[in-house]
Image (cartoon, rainbow, N blue to C red):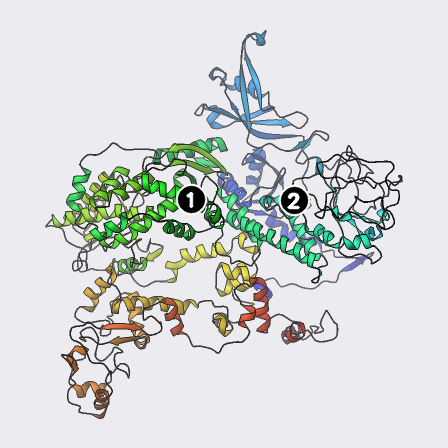
């Protein structure tokens, strides 16, 4: 039997011994000595107070100790970090250079030894990095800084920029502070005579701590607060009973929360029968030294209360403190039969405190009571409320402290004794369920997770996602343009504002004559019908439709309201929203408040170190999104008329896959002996969306004959933005934009496509005016010189210097007009069959980096031969890294199923293998009606998507890829007759191999018969008619079309020479051909006769019989976690004891619930 989890250890059994009542083991000393060698060169460290994220510690340690011999960083759950070095000398060098600061916090380091006990010590003095502002320049020396820093503590050393005076805005000094002294935020520097310094001028020195450690002045040590001070005695020990105070029983009236408390000595002296409180448990206690005790001051059986947890306090007290709230049922007061005077005390008013009050006592009251206590029984519904109170503050759920409290209280909800027949309990349950739903909605918005379905209340995953997002988005340090290290939130904010204000807030001088240039090169303009369509009035229904089409949980703008708020409150604010939007379209004026935008910084690389490594994503106000999307919906239908076929992005009917397939065809065998010289350029534009010149864009719209009204709307949206940068959870800066397009603006993609169309027009004009220009290999027939998908540009031409100069001139002219420049460092040049001298001239001409295949294009590796496993490894590594993320460990089976639908991750999580799968993958991929989970099988789904290209080649819309295929692969034939060349690309070969699978799925209806193959297409009622006998008997060519047997509007077959040909003639289609009409095709798997991926996928699989139970298990409103377990149970694949017995003969099969019957699916569930 293979070891579980694939572990190579050969474990053995050793007999333990007993010491008293406990089992003990005592391994020999050599056992520990053998493993000690692996930890010999290791330092153990920890941080005072809370631990830092492991990724931050690992990256920082590798950066500062990597050249000192650091090999690996490990961590445990207690906050200890283990730094493994190459040798003992490296460990000593690091220890001698202490103190070390990670993100401004000191790390305590110890040398590992075999008897090291992992414990965190208390320190009275620790070093802290501080910034000192407003230091006069004459004191910026060793003596001056020493005197100034001494006001904070004992100065240790200054950083290199402070010593060299390269940064004079502040001085950064490492200072040793004492826990017995208060931390100062500012102090005065007297610049007078040394004998009497107070006579001179004084300057206020500001102090900023990179990290303020917690300390408690009573014990004079760092690293803890009053609540967990080890030198103070706890208020109560966990095993100690609470003694009842020997006080006179007295009752006090309980008033409203804000009303004063009045206690009368003449209050009722006989308390109600609270005997049922004997099992009550005190959840936590607090310091109530100066707080009045709750009346009654003595409860029966209080000495039997068990203390579960406590907080530490300075002084102990015998007072029993509790929070008394007024219950929801205010008019039904206590009606004790034995005492008529007690009419204001309601035991149900004892509840969990509000989460905003930290000084309180939580009391867990039971949900049942003996029948002789009528008062307690009458308030049972309010006691049910006790167990769930405290969950009503979802806005604080992202706090770790609040999260722990809520987790504990949710556990009490689960353990409470619910009564299904109790209507009051059901009402409270519904109320709390609504609260939890609101909490989940809030967490979903904070975590920015879009793919978990409603119903799986996996809030732990949302918590982890929120915390992970916060850690990833924090920018502690950044490298400036001059190479200097910028630390501290204030300086990082300044650097961010400076960087993006330089990009977005820069306006180049106005260039005259742009309009004339554009009008000379643009030959296709918008038709008059489309002009009227774009300029029509905006209706109220259109505004409402656009508002409700917005995604409800996208990030809001500066106003804080996302589209979900506008949708659910439309009955209240709908008229105002319509009026505001209509006012803009009438006047063309946009308030700057509406166009205020937050720039969210999204990393473009895994570990960004500079501001240029962040992509600014615009978070716009919802009202602005409505306006922009209305304009975008009017621009989109006009793009196919004015955008050339070489652009595929954001144009209806064009697909990203067409560009990928075409580039793959053109780059095939690029490094082999080619028939002619080739040149390909992968052009990277520098920040294309952020640097578009507004004047150029508006002139381009005029040249394309956009309506003046629409240009006025677009100009108002472009020229009025105000930007604030979201950095480290705060907004920084407020500056005006002077160029660029909002990223994630609904209108920006279409405007950018229009900008890039100018490059196509310039290049076409240059090629037309240059007789020496030659096209790239296999590009002449369709006049292809470049491919664009948004800002991804591929330039193609003959590998000659004259053709390359035409391309270079077009790029330079486009840069001059639009303000978009080429990033030479990220652009690549590829040549094939070009001499060394010409190759060097081409490199010098463009200044690009010499590239090598494979290279990524639109996320797919472009290769010169067939796709190999190593070519896909970067994509696979990214997927594996995402799956192995610690965020995903909070997901159940159902949560994983919503995250990503493949076998290994579903059953093993981050393990990455398929061992332990409960149900085979083919059954999981069945539709829900057939007993599966409706997951698409990847192989079948890939074939279904490939069939789309076959459909397009046959009877789909004509795009650039299909035009190229017909020009260079079909020539005078069609898809049915095309041969499979031995030198064709591997993707074209894969498509051709699918033809037999697709032919029965397409029904051809004959018009003139010119586009339908006589032998291979499915036009005859009996299917394709190819057979050697019929072919030879007919005397027709193998490449002939149906038009050869069409004469006018009738069929005209050759004379039948065999029975097979005679039967074909006798069963011809019931309709007659029409020589004036083209042939048409119908996709049979779809009801409307048009191809769809879902219908293609359904046609590729073998149907199974329906199961009767799927509606009861996999219905739309189900809870995914529950339905998934029930689905596995119905399939009989849960790990019940009778199944375990099959591979473990020694396993016990008796049910643990009844101890009578064998544990099986039928016994447990059915």
Q: Residue at image x 20%, y 41%? A: 813
Q: Which residue is mark 1?
A: 577
Front one among 527 and 24: 527
Find the distance from the CA under tag 1 to the CA under tag 2.
Answer: 69 Å
Q: Is residue 652 above or below residue 501?
A: below
Callout 2 crowding tier (Cα within 10 Å): few <14, some 14–19, many ≥20: some
Q: Would residue 536 be visible to someone looking at this image?
A: yes
- Outermost residue toward the left in this view: 771
Residue 997 falls in image quadrant? bottom left
Camera-nearest label, 1 or 2 = 1
Looking at this view, is 1030 or 826 the one in front?
Answer: 1030
The correct choice, above or below, for 19 with respect to 699 in the image is: below
Q: Secondary structure at mark 1?
A: helix
Residue 484 location in percent, x, y? 42, 32
Q: Earlier in the sequence, mark 1 or mark 2?
A: 2
Residue identifier under label 2? 113
Q: Nearest the camera: 124 or 733? A: 733
């Amino acid at each position: 039997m293979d070891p579980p989890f694939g572990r190579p250890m050969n474990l053995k059994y050793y007999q333990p011994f007993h010491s008293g009542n406990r089992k003990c083991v005592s391994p020999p000393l050599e056992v520990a000595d053998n493993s000690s060698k692996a930890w010999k060169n290791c330092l153990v460290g920890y941080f005072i107070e809370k631990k830092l994220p492991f990724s931050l510690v690992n990256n920082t340690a590798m950066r500062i100790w990597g050249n000192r011999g650091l090999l690996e960083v490990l961590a445990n759950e207690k906050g200890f970090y283990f730094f493994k070095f190459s040798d003992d000398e490296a460990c000593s060098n690091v220890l001698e250079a202490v103190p070390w600061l990670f993100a401004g916090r000191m790390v305590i380091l110890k040398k590992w030894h075999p008897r090291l006990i992992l414990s965190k010590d208390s320190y009275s003095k620790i070093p802290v990095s501080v910034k000192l502002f407003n230091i006069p320049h004459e004191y910026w020396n060793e003596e001056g800084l020493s005197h100034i820093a001494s006001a904070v503590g004992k100065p240790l050393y200054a950083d290199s920029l402070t010593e060299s005076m390269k940064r004079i805005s502040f001085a950064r000094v490492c200072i040793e502070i004492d826990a017995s002294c208060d931390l100062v935020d500012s102090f005065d520097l007297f610049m007078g005579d040394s004998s009497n310094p107070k006579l001179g001028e004084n300057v206020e020195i500001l102090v900023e701590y990179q990290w303020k450690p917690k300390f408690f002045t009573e014990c004079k040590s760092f690293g803890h607060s009053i609540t967990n001070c080890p030198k103070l005695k706890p208020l109560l020990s966990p095993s100690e009973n609470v003694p009842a105070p020997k006080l006179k029983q007295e009752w006090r009236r309980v008033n409203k929360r804000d009303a004063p408390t009045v206690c009368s000595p003449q209050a009722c002296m006989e308390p109600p029968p609270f005997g049922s409180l004997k099992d009550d448990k005190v959840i936590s206690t607090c310091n109530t030294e100066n707080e009045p005790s709750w009346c009654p001051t003595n409860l029966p059986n209080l000495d039997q209360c068990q203390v579960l947890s406590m907080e530490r306090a300075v002084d102990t007290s015998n007072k029993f403190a509790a929070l008394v709230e007024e219950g929801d049922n205010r008019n039904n007061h206590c009606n004790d039969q034995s005492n008529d005077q007690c009419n204001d005390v309601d035991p149900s008013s004892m509840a969990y405190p509000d989460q905003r009050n930290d000084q309180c006592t939580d009391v867990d009251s039971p949900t049942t009571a003996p029948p002789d206590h009528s008062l307690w029984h009458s308030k049972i519904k309010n006691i049910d409320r006790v167990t769930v109170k405290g969950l009503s503050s979802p806005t604080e759920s992202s706090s770790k402290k609040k999260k722990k409290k809520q987790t504990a209280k949710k556990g009490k909800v689960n353990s409470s004794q619910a009564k299904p027949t109790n209507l009051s309990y059901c009402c409270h349950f519904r109320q709390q369920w609504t609260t939890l739903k609101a909490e989940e909605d809030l967490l979903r918005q904070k975590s920015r997770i879009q793919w978990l379905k409603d119903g799986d209340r996996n809030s732990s995953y949302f918590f982890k996602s929120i915390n992970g997002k916060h850690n990833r988005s924090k920018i502690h340090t950044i490298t400036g343009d001059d190479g200097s290290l910028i630390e501290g939130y204030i300086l990082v904010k300044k650097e961010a504002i400076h960087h993006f204000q330089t990009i977005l807030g820069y306006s180049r001088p106005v260039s005259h004559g742009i309009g004339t240039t554009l009008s000379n090169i643009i030959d296709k303009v918008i038709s008059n019908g489309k002009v009227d369509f774009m300029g029509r009035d905006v209706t109220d229904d259109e505004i409402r439709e656009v508002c409700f089409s917005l995604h409800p949980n996208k990030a809001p703008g500066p106003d804080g309201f996302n589209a979900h708020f506008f949708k659910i409150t439309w009955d209240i604010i709908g008229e105002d929203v319509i009026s505001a939007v209509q006012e803009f379209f009438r006047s063309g004026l946009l308030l700057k408040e509406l166009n205020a935008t937050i720039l969210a910084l999204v990393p473009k690389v895994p570990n960004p170190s500079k501001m240029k490594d962040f992509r600014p994503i615009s978070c716009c106000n919802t009202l602005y999104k409505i306006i922009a999307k209305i304009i975008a919906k009017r621009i989109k239908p006009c793009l196919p008329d004015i955008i050339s076929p070489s652009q595929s992005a954001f144009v209806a009917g064009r697909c990203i896959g067409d560009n990928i397939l075409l580039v793959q065809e053109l780059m095939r065998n690029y490094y082999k002996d080619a028939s002619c010289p080739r040149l390909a350029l992968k052009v990277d534009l520098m920040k294309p969306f952020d640097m578009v010149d507004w004047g150029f864009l508006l002139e381009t719209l005029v040249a394309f004959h956009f309506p003046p009204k629409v240009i006025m709307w677009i100009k108002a949206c472009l020229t009025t933005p105000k930007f604030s940068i979201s950095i480290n959870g705060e907004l920084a800066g407020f500056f005006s934009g002077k160029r660029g397009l909002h990223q994630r603006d609904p209108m920006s993609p279409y405007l950018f496509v229009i900008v890039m169309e100018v490059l196509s027009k310039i290049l076409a004009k240059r090629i037309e005016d240059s007789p020496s220009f030659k096209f790239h290999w296999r590009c002449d027939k369709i006049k292809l010189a470049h491919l664009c998908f948004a800002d991804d540009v591929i330039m193609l031409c003959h590998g000659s210097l004259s053709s390359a100069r035409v391309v270079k001139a077009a790029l330079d002219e486009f840069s001059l007009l639009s303000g978009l420049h080429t990033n030479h460092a990220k652009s690549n040049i590829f040549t094939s069959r070009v001499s060394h001298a010409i190759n060097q001239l081409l490199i010098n001409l463009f200044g690009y980096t010499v590239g090598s295949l494979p290279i990524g294009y639109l996320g797919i590796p472009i290769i010169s031969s067939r796709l190999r496993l190593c070519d896909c490894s970067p994509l696979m590594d990214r997927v594996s890294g995402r799956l192995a993320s610690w965020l995903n460990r909070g997901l159940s089976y159902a949560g994983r199923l919503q995250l990503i639908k493949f076998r290994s991750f579903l059953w093993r999580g981050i393990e990455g293998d398929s061992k332990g799968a409960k149900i085979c993958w083919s059954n999981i991929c069945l539709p829900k009606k057939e007993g599966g989970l409706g997951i698409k099988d990847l192989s079948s789904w890939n074939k279904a998507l490939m069939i789309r290209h076959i459909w397009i080649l046959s009877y789909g819309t004509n795009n650039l890829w299909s035009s190229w295929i017909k020009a260079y692969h079909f020539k005078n034939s069609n898809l049915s007759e095309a041969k499979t060349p031995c030198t064709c690309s591997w993707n074209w070969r894969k498509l051709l191999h699918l033809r037999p699978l697709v032919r029965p799925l397409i029904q051809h209806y004959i018009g003139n018969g010119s586009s339908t193959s006589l032998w291979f297409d499915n036009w005859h009622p009996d299917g394709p008619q190819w057979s050697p006998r019929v072919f030879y008997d007919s005397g027709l060519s193998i490449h002939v079309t149906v038009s050869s047997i069409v004469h006018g509007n009738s069929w005209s077959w050759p004379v039948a020479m065999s029975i097979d040909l005679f039967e074909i003639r006798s069963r011809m289609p019931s309709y007659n051909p029409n020589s004036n009409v083209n042939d048409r095709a119908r996709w049979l798997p779809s009801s409307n006769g048009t191809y769809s991926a879902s219908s293609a996928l359904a046609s590729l699989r073998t149907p199974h019989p329906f199961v009767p139970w799927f509606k009861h298990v996999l219905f739309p409103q189900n809870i995914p976690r529950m339905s998934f377990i029930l689905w596995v149970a119905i399939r009989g694949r849960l790990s019940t004891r009778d199944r375990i017995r099959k591979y473990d003969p020694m396993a016990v099969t008796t049910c643990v619930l009844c101890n009578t019957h064998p544990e099986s699916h039928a016994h447990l569930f059915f």
